[in-house]
Image (cartoon, grey):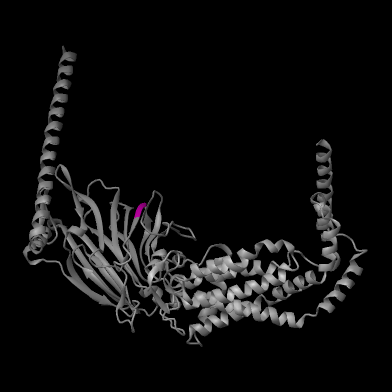
Amino acid sequence: MEKKSSIIGFILIAFIFLGYSIYNTHQQRKIAERIALEERAAKAAQAAHPAQVQTQTAGQTLQNNGLTAVIGNADSVKIAAETFTVENDYLVITFDTQGGQIRSAELKEYTKYAEKGESKEQVKLFDPQTANFNLAFNVKNGYVNMPINTADHVFEKVGVEKTESGQRVTMRLPVFNEANAGLVYVYTIHNSTDPSRDYMVDFSVRFENMAPYMARETRIGIDWSNTSYQNERGFKNENMYTTISYREPGEKSISELSMGTGTKDKKISTQVNWIAFKQQFFSSVFIADGNFSEASMKYETNAPDSKLIKNFSAEMSVPFNPQTEDYSFAFYLGPNKYAILKNIDRNGEKIAMERLIPLGWGIFGWVNRWFTIPVFDLLRNYIPSFGIIILILAVLVKLIISPLTYKSYLSTAKMRVIKPEMDAINAKYPKQEDAMKKQQAMMELYKKAGINPLGGCLPMLIQMPIIIAMFRFFPASIELRGQKFLWSHDLSSYDSVLNLPFSIPFYGDHVSLFALLMTIVFFLYSFLNYKQTASNQPQMLGMKFMMVYLMPLMMLFWFNDYSSGLSYYYFLTTILSMIQTYAIRYMVDDNKIHAMIQVNAAKKSNGKKSRFQQRYEEQMRMYQEQMSKNKKGK
């Protein structure tokens, strides 16, 4: 009987819990529907009376275990959103109590490009109308969770106070007045005359007395978005360098969304240290000292005539710990300048911000970091004209590689001197099946003459990293931005001496004089170089069209929209190459070279073969044997 009563008791208890759960769920649904209805009504009212609803939003209330949660200020009728500015030697920052966020960042040292006359409009990193920063989390409200999105609410402006090294802006969003609980934003603007510090805005988020009232949160969501202005002359070139970059903790390199037009997005499920809305010469970077646990990023490209470049957005999250009240972040709002970015650190650790500047990977980046940038930084202290600095840089590069250039020309001259012997070998082995014998004979001739067949290519191989490094450096160098030289108004952008009434595919709607001059000089150099090499190397005869005509034409199309400083640099290096070639040719006597070849041939006729030559002859012997077997098999 006792056992039967126990079973009945358990069944009754189960029914009671089931009934309570159904009732509780029904009540939660009703509360959630009421909240959703109120939010829809608030949004509809906001469309009709924005100012009135703004004060109502500030005083939105809910009941929570006997406490009154006021999302915003309790005295809502007196609270309305306001904007105010704070500045240091480098930045003018506009804050908005709506969302407690940065609404605008203006750079004092930089102006937008102006087509006519001197520009007086300061660079603004993003459009204030589209700027948005939001923290998303939930608080407990009886049986349901109440979502809070900070961008929807008006913060109290607690104050702007001066500190020893700058200013501190504090804004607060009250949540539970009776418990003195709320969300506190503290922005620190530095004024230390150190750009790597003063372009940084430290940002602290404090969950003040909020731990008991937070829902079972494991993370805090962060939404950040804005739209970048067009600050440079050409939309195409600026857009090409505008994208979203990010760094994973501990990495010395960074990753980014592919550059280009249209829409690009990416989701990162691993930790991220910082995310940058990067433009050609300026960036807005959001840094998490404790790292973001995940991130989703996206950009959309605007129309070329909109005066805007890209719409940026990023959704991130940070782990939530009830025992932690303060979360540390920072914004970098400034130029993509190597000297500044390389010195930025957080908590004593370098965070690879200088990688925002696309200097190239591997050896190309090394050339720019350890040669090009130091030379520019040194020379600009003494020379005001960047046109002269680029000229000196081109001369330095030519002087550095001049020994290799001399050896290259010497190798070419030797080839010219032994041309009769080469012709004799070609005449001796005219048949295709004797190609290996002819090659052996040529190699033996090269050995006696002391010629390295690759000697003529070596200077070009050495120059290639420098050429590519400059190709990356000039369009990304903010030092050239706005610098005038001759007819170019901005060495970081294209120069235009004629605007066309139409657009030529792949070329554009203007004529860049530096690009045109570079092309003409490159054509002359290619033509003269081809005449010299083709006579000595018959295999070069079939490459005339590509070397002499196609390459210069392609460069004209490529460089018409590129940095005029880059076209000017290539123009100078090509002229210097021509001068260097004719100077060496004047100094080198073919008769002396012929005599030197005879001496080398006498020395090496009884000399020991090198390992390379032994291996080469062994491979040639094996190849000939295989060819003979194949011929017999047929």
**603 to the left or right of 255:** right
Q: Quadrant of the C terminus?
A: top right
Residue 226 on image: x %, y %: 29, 63
Indicate the quadrant where residue 448 lies.
bottom right
Q: Nearer the viewer, residue 631 or 291?
A: 631
**What residue span does the magenta drawing correspond to?**
293-297
Q: Is residue 612 above or below residue 365?
A: above
Q: Is residue 548 visible?
A: yes
Magenta includes 294?
yes
**135 to the left or right of 118:** left
**564 to the left or right of 223:** right
Residue situated furthest top in the rendering: 1
Q: Main secondary structure of the magenta part?
A: strand
Residue at x-position 6% and y-position 64%: 77
Q: Nearer the viewer, residue 436 or 344?
A: 436
**524 to the left or right of 344:** right
Q: Is residue 611 visible?
A: no
Q: Quadrant of the N terminus?
A: top left
Residue 471 on image: x %, y %: 52, 69
Q: Nearer the viewer, residue 437 or 10?
A: 437
Residue 170 on image: x %, y %: 23, 68
Magenta includes 321?
no
Indicate the quadrant where residue 590 lies.
bottom right
Q: Is residue 522 above or below residue 207?
A: below
Q: Is residue 410 above or below residue 1?
A: below
Residue 155 on image: x %, y %: 17, 64
